[in-house]
Every structure is written in C-alpha cells, then in structure tokens.
C-alpha cells in the first residue's frame, strides 16, 4: 500500500456523512494491517474512527464491508433485545455522503468510518487477570451472539486464513525462494517448524471429518481487538471485524491465548522473558467457557488447547514467512521485528507443549 498522504486523508474524511464539520485527524491505535485515524469534529465535541482498509490483504473491500454491515446490524438487534447500548457495544458503520458503507479514493484505496467508542481502554498486553477474564467473556459472548447468524452469507475475506497446513506450505515456498537471503539466519526456527508439520493438520482434519462444527468466528481475537469500558472494567465492544468468517471456536479461543497468556510483548526480542502462563490460560478459559461453553460440544472443548498451540505456531510461521519475504505483510517499526515476533511465538508453543495435558484437563472441566 502507498503511504496515506494528508490530502488523501482530508478527501476521505470529507466523503463521510458525519453530520458535523470535521477538523483534525491523527493516526490512532496499534494495528498491524489497516491505516487507522481518529477524526475530530471541528468543534471537538466528538470523534470518529476513519480507516483505510489494507486492500493488499483484503482484496474485496465490497464483500468485506458487506460482512461488516451484516454482522454489526445483526449485533445491534441482539444488543437492543438484551437491553444494551448498541452505539457502544458493537461497531457502527458511518455511511458515506452517498449512503455507501465505504469510500474509494482517487488511488483506489478503500476507506470506512465507525462511531468512536469513547471511555474505553484497548490493551496491548495483559496487565491484570481481571482484564483478561473480561476479554474472554467478551469474545465468548460475541460468538454466542452470532450463533444464529447465517454463516453461509459471509464472504471469505482472506482465503484459507487459518488453514495451518497451507500456511506451512507457504512458508516452505518462501524458504525455497529466500528472496532476502535470510534463510541462513534461521536454522533453528526452520527445524522447529518442520518438526511440527504433522501437528498443523490436527484441527483441519477434525473439521473435515465432521468432528468439529463450523461457527461464525472472529479469527483475530487479540486482546487489542476488544474495548474495555474504563468506568466499569467490563468488556464492551469487539472490534476489527475484517476477518469474521466461518471458522472453529478453537481459532478464537486459541488466538487469544497466543496473545494474552504470557507476560511479554508479541515482539519481545529477549526469549528468556517469554513464558506461557498456564494460570492465565485458566483465567481465559474460565471467562470464555462461562460465556460460550454451554453451546460447545465436548469435541470443541477438547480442541481448545490445540487451538492455542496451532494459532501460536501458525502465527509464528506467518511472521517468519513475512520475514523471509521482506516484511511486506505485517507492519514493522524496526529491522528483524518479524523474526522476534516469530521466535516469541515458538517459545510460547514450547511452553504450551509442556503444559498440554493440564490445558486439556482444564478445557474439559471448567
Ligand atoms: P487493525 O486491523 O490494523 O488491527 P483495528 O480495526 O483493530 O485495525 O483498529 C486499530 C485500533 O484502533 C484498535 O486497536 C483500537 O485501539 C482502535 N479502534 C478501532 N476501532 C475503534 C472504535 N470504533 N472506537 C475506538 N477505538 C477504535
Ligand atoms: C494481524 O490486524 P491485527 O493487527 O489485529 C493479523 C492477525 C495476526 C496478528 C498478529 C488480517 O492482526 O492474523 O494474528 O496481526 N491480521 C490479519 O499480531 O492478517
Ligand atoms: Mg486490530
């Protein structure tokens, strides 16, 4: 993607029907994929989120926004029926002045706007158990709220997103091509991944065999994709709906564990500081199962530790593939950041492998 210029940003802000004249806009948040800005009303009375969708990643913005408007209007009805506040408990798409869900700029970039959910915190790291429990309940609840959503109407916004064997195959291709000449630095990581090739198939095989049911899932359940109410500490809004697609509950559970069941940053360079925490796993499992557990089958519960291990392994494989290919997918702010990210994932996978029996027991018993 080309950089966002001030002019593009100004034109994009002018395209939406905010109902008030707009003023300044600044970069906002810490996502790896989209370009996110906060746009203020000229009188500073309120602000909105304005995002340029990464169309290198999401090649069908029309289909993507159809998913987002479909899911958010469904959630709105569910939230209203439960007496909640739909302006804060789900994303709300602001239409363009032409009544469309997104705007196409003069370079072909696709932009969308959301109501800004004020009075919330968005955590980049687990700071206390209570917040992690809250995130678990919020993602579990999200899955429950969407249980009746017609999954077949959703577009697959990224083909084979959590197809771990395919991620593995792409890694081998990137390694063979080695366009940056980086393969020689990563011998131990290559061996680590290859030793786990068979593991990559476990969840996809269970899905194909009909052991695990397909559900509407979020597929990117990092802690920073949930907004927590500052006043009450309650998780209120699940954001970043670009990857809402049919998937496995183990993906959503697993990706949260990957990101949150540890005390380090995702790109921690010092591996001696990276520890998988069985305790935080238990905290998350309690919250998630309290919200979504009653609708889950025993096979699904049994799949949760696999979700944790495979989402972590898969993400590590993706970071390392991007490192080999020259860091064109995940935004980086320093050299070798994707290599550090990959190493962190693999250290966490090792920790999970040590605790795997205990993780399974907890998933079945809680
Ligand atoms: P990415 O796909 O790049 O991660 P996100 O959609 O997650 O983009 O948005 C990036 C960040 O912007 C989030 O982590 C959050 O801090 C903030 N954000 C996104 N949507 C909203 C919103 N509606 N209200 C308040 N903050 C938001
Ligand atoms: C990306 O968009 P963001 O920053 O929430 C990525 C996830 C990865 C994550 C790793 C669409 O998430 O799949 O797990 O980075 N999203 C996409 O931090 O590829
Ligand atoms: Mg995000």
Image (cartoon, rainbow, N blue to C red):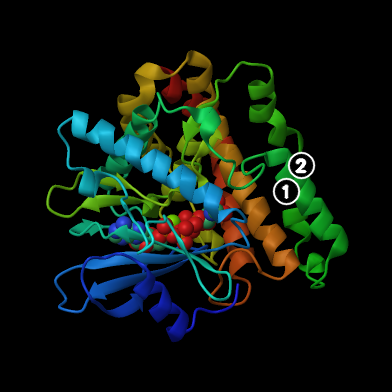
Give the labeled residue for mark 2: 195
What residue lies at 63% left-to-right and 46% top-to-bottom? 314
Mark 1 packing: few (<14 Cα in 10 Å), some, or many (20+)?
A: some
What residue lies at 39% left-to-right and 18% top-to-bottom? 295
Mark 2 CB in 8 Å range of ligand 2?
no
Distance between the Cα atoms at labels 2 and 1?
5 Å
Which percent across, then down, holds residue 127?
30, 55
The mark total stands at: 2
Q: Is residue 40 visible?
A: yes
Q: Nearer the viewer, residue 181 or 34?
A: 34
Disc 2 + disc 1, Cβ < 8 Å: yes
Give the labeled residue for mark 1: 192
Which element is circle 2 on?
Answer: loop
Which percent across, then down, holds residue 349?
59, 44
Q: Is residue 224 left or right of residue 322?
A: left
Which quadrant holds the C terminus?
top left
Mark 2 packing: few (<14 Cα in 10 Å), some, or many (20+)?
A: few
Q: Nearer the viewer, residue 206 or 116?
A: 116
Which element is circle 1 on?
Answer: helix
Q: Is residue 146 left or right of residue 199?
A: left
Q: Is residue 177 left or right of residue 60?
A: right
Which percent across, then down, holds residue 364?
44, 18
Quadrant of the rendered structure where residue 173 is?
Answer: bottom right
């Amino acid at each position: 993607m080309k950089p966002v210029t001030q002019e593009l940003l100004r034109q994009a802000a002018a395209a939406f029907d905010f109902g008030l004249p707009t003023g300044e806009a600044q970069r906002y948040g810490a996502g790896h994929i989209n370009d996110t800005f906060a746009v203020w009303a000229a009188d500073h009375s309120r602000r909105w989120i304005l995002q340029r969708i990464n169309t290198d990643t999401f090649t069908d913005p029309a289909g993507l926004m159809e998913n987002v408007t479909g899911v958010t209007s469904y959630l709105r009805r569910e939230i209203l029926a439960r007496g909640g506040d739909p302006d804060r408990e789900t994303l709300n798409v602001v239409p363009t002045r032409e009544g469309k869900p997104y705007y196409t700029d003069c370079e072909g970039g696709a932009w969308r706007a959301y109501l800004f959910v004020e009075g919330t915190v968005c955590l980049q790291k687990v700071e206390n158990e209570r917040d992690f429990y809250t995130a678990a309940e919020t993602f579990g609840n999200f899955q429950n709220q969407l249980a009746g959503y017609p999954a077949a109407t959703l577009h697959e916004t990224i083909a084979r997103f959590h197809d771990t064997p395919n991620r593995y195959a792409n890694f081998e291709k990137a390694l063979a091509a080695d366009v940056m000449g980086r393969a020689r630095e990563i011998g131990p990581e290559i061996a680590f991944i290859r030793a786990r090739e068979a593991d990559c198939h476990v969840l996809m095989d269970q899905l194909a065999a009909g052991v695990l049911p397909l559900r509407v899932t979020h597929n990117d359940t990092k802690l920073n994709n949930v907004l927590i109410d500052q006043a009450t500490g309650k998780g209120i809004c699940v954001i970043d709906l670009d990857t809402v697609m049919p998937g496995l509950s183990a993906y959503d559970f697993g990706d949260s564990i990957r990101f949150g069941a540890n005390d380090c940053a995702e790109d921690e360079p010092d591996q001696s500081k990276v520890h998988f925490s069985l305790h935080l796993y238990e905290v998350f499992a309690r919250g998630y199962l309290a919200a979504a557990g009653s609708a889950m089958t025993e096979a699904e519960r049994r799949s949760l530790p696999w979700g944790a291990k495979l989402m972590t392994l898969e993400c590590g494989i993706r970071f390392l593939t991007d490192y080999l290919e020259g860091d064109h997918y995940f935004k980086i702010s320093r050299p070798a950041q994707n290599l550090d990210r990959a190493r962190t994932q693999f250290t966490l996978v090792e920790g999970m492998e040590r605790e795997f029996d205990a993780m399974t027991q907890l998933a079945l018993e809680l």
